[in-house]
Image: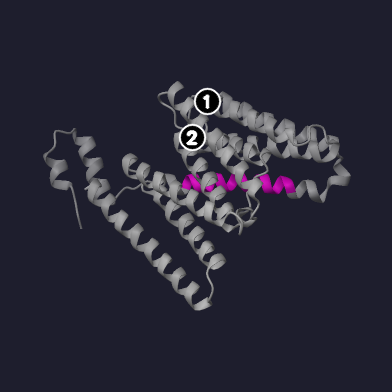
């Protein structure tokens, strides 16, 4: 097993720092941050789901106006808690803030379902509200909710089956939403040098752009254009991944391109044996390409 204990011992470090690093090398201490963060996120989701179940079971007894007021008060309490502790970052505070934002979304959806106040504009208002909260609290979770509401306003569903809808208009809306996020990302990056939002913009914009290209590729009338757009996106993403040293982006390029090419094969070629063979070749090629790229990233890191 590779160990850096000799290098740590030889380095000019304080005894406390050296002992802590050596303990990490020996796996005597290790971080539970990812596990605790996941549990905190799951806890917020469970509470929000419990609120939804409670409302659905007792809607007649509670009344629509009372439900709207209670949700608003609970959301305000969550935001107030996070604001009073804004100088002390913790997973608990972040989870309470996320819960408050989800309660706001639930309350907005409830009000719209009962009184039809704003129509589709409600999602746009939610996107703006969560965006303001994201910048005020410097929260990527709230930014994700804002982007989700914006995508919903464009008619982009979070369900995976929207990708295979073959709706060209939906593909164009996905491209427009991705372009807006790309512009938003660049403005945010230039205006705030220490921003932590860039990865959120990158991942979401790429997913939307690839989803739009895949919708075109799965439409029989636009399959050729969709494949060309997909290949162009995959090429640009691959170049960016190597330049920025972000291996995860290669997964988007490989997975979406393989699906798009498989869709083209099954739509335009005849013979199940030929199509199955080409599908297998494409999948093997994608896996081999990802393994080769992974080795390159590891060698560069070393």
**Element type where label 1 sits in the image:** loop
Residue plotted at (88% across, 45% down): 61
The residue to which callout 1 is attached is 86
Q: Residues within 10 Å of mark 1 (few under 14, many from 20)?
A: some
Image coordinates of residue 138 in percent, x first then y, are: 51, 28
Our reading of the magenta stretch's main secondary structure is helix
Q: How many numbered markers are drawn? A: 2
Query: How far separated are the C-alphas under marks 1 and 2?
Result: 9 Å
User: Which residue lies most toward the top here?
Assistant: 191
154 or 223, nearer to the observer? 223
197, 227: nearer the viewer: 227
Q: Position of residue 175 (x, y in %)?
A: 57, 41
Q: Which residues are magenta?
A: 36-52
Which class describes the residues within 10 Å of circle 2: few (<14), some (14-19), or many (20+)? few
Q: Residue at x 50, y 72 (%)?
A: 275
Decide if residue 201 is on the left or right side of residue 81: left
Q: Is residue 192 visible?
A: no
Residue at 55% from the left image edge and 24% from the top image edge: 136
Horizontal side, residue 166 vs residue 6: left or right: right
């Amino acid at each position: 097993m590779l160990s850096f204990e000799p290098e740590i011992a030889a380095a000019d470090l304080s005894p406390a720092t050296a002992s802590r690093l050596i303990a990490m090398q020996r796996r005597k201490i290790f971080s539970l941050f990812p596990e605790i963060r996941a549990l905190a996120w799951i806890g917020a989701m469970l509470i929000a789901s419990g609120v939804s179940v409670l409302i659905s079971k007792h809607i007649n007894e509670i009344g629509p106006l009372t439900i709207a007021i209670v949700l608003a008060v609970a959301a305000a309490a969550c935001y107030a808690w996070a604001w009073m502790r804004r100088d002390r970052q913790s997973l608990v505070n972040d989870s309470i803030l996320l819960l408050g934002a989800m309660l706001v979304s639930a309350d907005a959806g409830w009000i719209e379902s009962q009184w039809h106040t704003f129509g589709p504009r409600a999602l746009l208002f939610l996107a703006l509200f969560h965006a303001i909260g994201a910048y005020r609290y410097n929260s990527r979770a709230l930014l994700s909710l804002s982007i989700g509401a914006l995508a919903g306003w464009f008619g982009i569903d979070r369900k995976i089956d929207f990708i295979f809808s073959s709706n060209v208009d939906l593909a164009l809306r996905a491209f427009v939403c991705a372009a807006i996020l790309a512009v938003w990302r660049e403005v945010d990056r230039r205006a705030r040098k220490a921003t932590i939002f860039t990865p959120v913009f990158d991942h979401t914009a790429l997913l939307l752009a690839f989803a739009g290209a895949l919708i075109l590729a799965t439409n029989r009338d636009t399959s050729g254009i969709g494949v060309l757009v997909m290949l162009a996106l995959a090429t640009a993403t691959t170049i960016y991944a190597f330049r920025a040293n972000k291996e995860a982006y290669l997964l988007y390029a490989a997975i979406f391109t393989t699906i798009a090419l498989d869709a083209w094969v099954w739509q335009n070629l005849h013979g199940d044996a030929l199509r199955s063979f080409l599908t297998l070749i494409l999948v093997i090629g994608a896996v081999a390409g990802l393994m080769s790229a992974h080795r390159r990233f590891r060698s560069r890191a070393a």
